[in-house]
Amino acid sequence: MYKLRKTIYSDNSFIEDILFTNNSKQYSIPFDPANTDYANFKKEVLAGAELQDDTGNVMTQEQADDFIKELP
């Protein structure tokens, strides 16, 4: 399962990344086209892996596909 995360700081800056849980461990994947985990994330979501938005709502497959298509 993948979850989008947005962390907002007091100066209104934010960092977005992807949380991935595997074997009860959580990993952070940056939105970086050079990162192999990022490439794998996009492939898995397009193949049907669950993706949650930053509020914890599960995206439909169509919403997830549209989101992935907008990424670099």
Image (cartoon, rainbow, N blue to C red):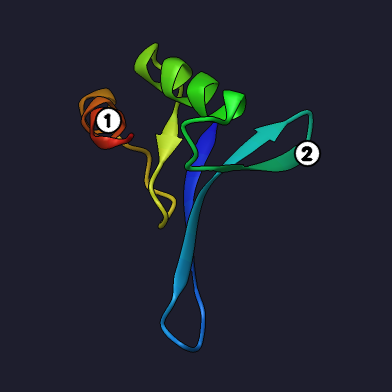
Instruction: Specify the amino acid type for callout 1.
Output: Thr
Q: Secondary structure at mark 2?
A: strand
Pick the residue in front: 34 or 40.
34
Q: Residues within 10 Å of mark 1 (few under 14, many from 20)?
A: few
Q: Residue 62 in the image: state x and y as whole percent.
A: 21, 25
Q: Which residue is mark 1?
A: 60
Total numbered labels: 2
From this viewpoint, which residue is outermost toward the bottom?
Answer: 10
Residue at (24, 28) in percent of width and height: 69
Instruction: Specify the amino acid type for callout 2.
Output: Lys
Above or below 49: residue 28: below
Q: Secondary structure at mark 1?
A: loop
Q: Residues within 10 Å of mark 2 (few under 14, many from 20)?
A: few
Q: Which residue is mark 2?
A: 25
Pick the residue in front: 72 or 43.
72
From this viewpoint, which residue is outermost toward the top?
Answer: 47
Rounded to the nearest whole Å, what is the CA distance between mark 1 and mark 2? 25 Å
Work out whether mark 1 precedes mark 2 in sequence or the reverse, and give the earlier one.
2
Above or below 53: residue 8: below
